[in-house]
Amino acid sequence: MSDSDVKSKRITATGSLAVGPARIRQIQIKTGSGTPRLTVTDGSGGTTVLDLDFNASDTHSVNIPSNGIRVSDIHVSTLTNITAATFFFN
């Protein structure tokens, strides 16, 4: 049995997802041209918990193993050449 329901939130710019404490379970990414990069921190100004580079002009699925990445709030500090990102969390 799951301990809580999974929710999702789509973003197109940097900043806080304003979801409070969460475990990141999966991220879906739609990239543009250039060198796409995504950096996620534990709240605004917090430590980097995820820093990924992607292939250009593609769709990517990032599955987080085990119980996911625990953060006080999901904050995207870098969203370079990425059209949109959808975070799945609980």
Image (cartoon, rainbow, N blue to C red):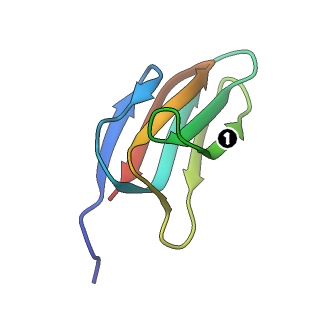
> Which SS class for mark 1?
strand
Q: Write down the residue under mark 1.
A: 51
Residue 11 versus residue 49 in the image, above or below = above
Residue 35 placement: quadrant = top right
Q: Is residue 2 above or below residue 12?
A: below
Q: Amino acid at mark 1?
A: Asp
Q: Residue furthest left?
A: 5
Note whether 36 is above or below 67 in the view shown: above
Position of residue 37 in the picture relative to residue 47 (left or right): right
Residue placed most toward the observer, 32 or 4: 4
Residue at the outermost front position:
45
Location of residue 78 in the rendering, given as x and y in whole percent from the top left corner = 59, 26
Q: Position of residue 62 (x, y in %)?
A: 58, 50
Tell me the quarter of the image containing the C terminus: bottom left
The residue that appears at 29% across and 47% down in the rendered structure is: 20
Residue name at image x 28 percent, y 43 percent: 19
The picture places residue 17, in percent across and down from the top left corner, at 35, 35
Left or right, 51 with respect to 74, comes to right
Q: Looking at the image, which is closer to me, 79 or 44?
A: 44
Residue at point 32%, 39% (across, down): 9
- Does 1 sit above or below residue 28? below
Tell whether 20 sits left or right of 37: left
The percent coordinates of residue 12 (x first, y second) are 43, 21
